[in-house]
Image (spheres, rainbow, N blue to C red):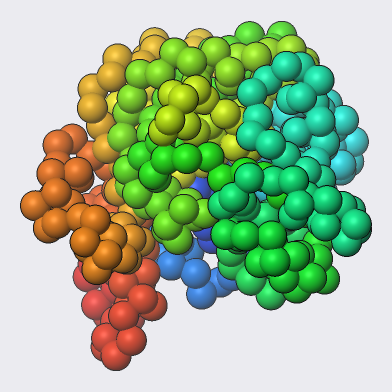
Amino acid sequence: MGRSLAQGLDRPPAIVIGLDCLQGLQSARILSARGVPVVGIAKDRAHYATATRACESILIADTGGPALTDLLERLGPSFRSRPVLFPCQDKNVLLLSRDRHRLEPWYRIALAPNDVVETLMDKASFYDYAQKAGLPLPPTYVLRDRADAERAAAELPYPSILKPSVRLREWSRHTKLKALIAEEPRQLLEHYDLFSQWASVLVAQQLIRGGDSAHVTCNSYYDRRGEPLVIFTTRKIRQWPPRTGQACSSEEVRDDEAVDLTLRVFGGIGYHGLGYLETKRDAVTGQHSIIEANVGRPTGRSATAEAADVELLYTMYCDAVGLPLPVNRKQRYLGVKWLHLLRDLQASGYHWRRGELTVREWWRSISGPRTHAIASWRDPLPFVKAVRSAVPGLPRTTGAARRRA
């Protein structure tokens, strides 16, 4: 982005970092629709999200390394008013949190103190914090060596789940999986022996009983005083991959227990910024257990809130720049659903082949008011590009056709 463009943005811009991910694309669209100038920063120029028209400009940089901080420092003096940073991936959040002393002269950063960010982002330290606070967790073991793994394998109930304490580059270079399921002790140790090469600390937990729809998530935003300005709850309908993946369809739900847990997690630690808590209701006991927290960034369900007239991201923007807060900040449970069509077709096909889902049940599960993760009539090219990437053999769209679209 050139100096002239930066100076031409009269309203404080939003810098969406990690545009080349689902939550990055959604955030850019949401903010642009509210009249906020958006500058996107992506690592992968070929990603479908870079085809969006929601951004005034798109820059390419390594969004998880020092080059990002260097780029932001160079750009900072060119803006008339300090932009608001919207990191959209854990690696962006961690980098900005650690480098905030270099960036705060030029940018508005809605993040808790770095020690709080690091505590909540690292699963091992987060679970330690949750246990000391008396929050409900499934049986959990932190694995720092094979002796820890052997103890966990012998003592955990099964099935169990194994995941990295922090999912960093080395893990992502070797696998896209968030977690692995072990059905018995030997399998847990086999998983540990392989995946401990790519994460120095792993976490093993009992897999809470219940299907994908037992997962309840709560998105929230807290001001500098730690006051919650927005709370929004959803539940998963399906996820991909099944049992250990990310939501590919979800819907609004009222769940006061999940809200209470969210306020207890973020309310007692001096929190500021976007916060997300995933819980799961045990199919036998009916009790919630905490699965994980995401801090400082939007999630896929942020778009569900906006579609349900709850201004989650715009509230953060207004609070950061000192504008009057949006009126629509309270959830009214309109029954809005969120759908990542491509992934949901994969998940539905999996359940259909296992006799767990019929076509009629699938259609009923996504019917009603809904918003789409990628598809948009106002911004169609990202979806076109995503479909073209997902389905081999489709013809490439010509430049002339893109301009017509």
Q: Position of residue 280 (x, y in %)?
A: 49, 33
Examine the rendered structure and indicate whether residue 77 appears above or below residue 391. above
Q: Give the side of residue 149 with respect to residue 246, left or right.
A: right
Q: Quadrant of the N terminus?
A: bottom right
* Image quarter of residue 7: top right
Could you say which quadrant of the image residue 85 lies in?
top right
**In the orientation shown, which residue stands out farthest toward the front?**
154
Closer-to-camera residue (18/393): 393
The relative height of residue 173 versus residue 322 in the rendered view (above or below) is below
Residue 256 % position (x, y): 44, 13
Q: Is residue 243 left or right of residue 260?
A: left
Residue found 66% across the figure and 66% down from its top: 187
Judging depth in this view, the residue of 53 and 240 nearest the camera is 240
x 32%, y 43%: residue? 237
Q: Is residue 11 left or right of residue 348?
A: right
Q: How many marks?
A: 0
Residue at horizontal 69 percent and vertical 36 percent from the top:
139
Q: Is residue 229 visible?
A: yes
Quadrant in the rendering for residue 271: top right
Residue 382 position within the rendered picture, expressed as x and y whole percent measured from the top left: 36, 63
